[in-house]
Amino acid sequence: MSPKRIAQKLITDVIENYNTTFHRSIGMTPNEAKGKVMEADLSHNQVEAERIEKEFDVGSSVLYRLKKQAFDKEAARWSKAVYKIVGIDGYRVQIRSRNGHTLYKAPNDLKMVNTETTDAVINRGDILEAEKILYHKKTRSGKYKYLIKWLGNEPDSWEPQDNLRLVSKDRKSTLENEYWAKKHK
């Protein structure tokens, strides 16, 4: 046996021994704790998702919290435009203004209000709603860049695939699925 294989075998044995030995600080072995931590995370995530669904109703009016800038002590803390909740996507709430400006915000960044939705001023840093993918190209890293046609009067732009995948970076967005379905016909 080569020295490298012997070292690998010894390291594997040490790790296995460590993970199956009782630890007083956690009251169990690390292998036992791994499953319990995952169960705790899953139950917490389920409770959090249910809380978000109870707290926010589709059709409710909200303001969203503005990002704090340096030296903005007296600046506005909430958006001027009033948005309507149009959907809940995991831990993100999809909101839309009267003129169709769509954003995805965390529930903690939303404040319920009792007024009608208003038009929103579109800032370049905001998330815009894509109408469709016009073209694609593959980058050196193996990921795709898409030429996006935006809703409204926004000019078309090239966007990396990660910008279209808000929920999971490994799962294609609805827009990507529609594009590839048309491409393979």
Image (cartoon, rainbow, N blue to C red):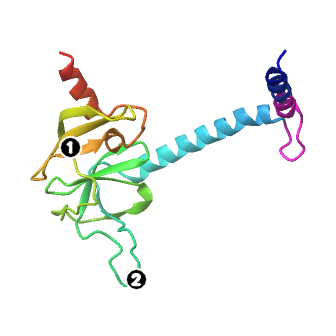
Query: Callout 2: few (<14), some (14-19), or many (20+) C-alpha neighbours within 10 Å?
Result: few
Element at label 2: loop
Residue 97 on image: x %, y %: 20, 57
Name the outermost residue toward the front: 2
Q: Residue at x 27, y 44 (%)?
A: 159
User: What number is the disc on residue 130?
Assistant: 1
Left/right of residue 48 with respect to residue 171 in the rendered view: right
Element at label 1: strand
Q: Which residue is mark 2?
A: 71
Left/right of residue 153 with respect to residue 7 in the rendered view: left
Residue 119 on image: x %, y %: 15, 63
Residue 19 on image: x %, y %: 82, 32
The quadrant of the rendering that contains the C terminus is top left
Of mark 1 and mark 2, the one earlier in the sequence is: 2
Q: Residue at x 33, y 45 (%)?
A: 163
Question: Is 55 part of what is drawn in magenta?
Answer: no
User: What number is the disc on residue 82?
Assistant: none
Q: Residue at x 19, y 22 (%)?
A: 183
Viewer-nearest residue: 11 or 54: 11
The quadrant of the rendering that contains the N terminus is top right
Q: Which residues are magenta?
A: 14-28
